[in-house]
Amino acid sequence: MVARNDFANSFIIMSDSSIYISGHSESGTSPVKTDSGRGGYDYWVVHFNYYNNTTGIQNLSSANGVSLSPNPTKSMVTIKGLPNIRLETSLIGIEGRLINHHLMQGGAEVNYALEDVSPGMYLLRFTGGQFTATVKVVKE
């Protein structure tokens, strides 16, 4: 088998948290692709579904001592456990797109507004000094 180019061109996250990835391949067979293709570019769709093995929201909202509530939320979350230092805060879409980035003062309890973002799952990343935490938040 000669490895050539395999490309994932797009993906979609479904409401059940499964993911469809589509792309094309110039490669032959592999451990995950048993059909050698039909010549030229062959189009592929892969479906990832974790069924009951995914981590529930209650397990996603805590990292490095940082917790969010309520999660899911309609507009605002209260963040507990941030150190009392200046933090770079990034809101990242689950697909990896940076939604916003700003500096904020940490502390025992800080509010974070999500009114201006669309419903979906996001990552909130906090970094400052030696501190780093990333927590997942769901906007309803």
Image: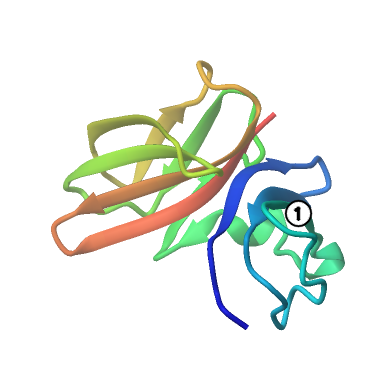
Which is more toward the observer, 3 or 54? 3
Where residue 104 appears, x then y in whole percent? 24, 34
Where residue 30 appears, x then y in whole percent? 69, 80
Q: Is residue 57 above or below residue 96?
A: below
**Does 101 sit left or right of 71 as displayed?**
left
Answer few, some or many: residues within 10 Å of disc 1's Cα (few below 14, many 20 plus, some between 14 and 19).
Answer: some
Query: In the rendered image, which quarter is residue 92 located in?
Result: top left
Q: Is residue 127 above or below residue 77?
A: below
Which residue is at 57% across, 23% downward? 75
Where residue 115 appears, x then y in whole percent? 53, 18
The residue tagged 1 is 44
Which residue is at 77% across, 72% downward? 36
Which residue is at 36% across, 58% downward? 133
Amino acid carrying mark 1 in the image: Trp
Describe the element under mark 1 as helix, strand or loop.
strand
**Does 109 sit left or right of 56 as displayed?**
left
Position of the N terminus by quadrant: bottom right
Where residue 98 appears, x then y in whole percent? 39, 35
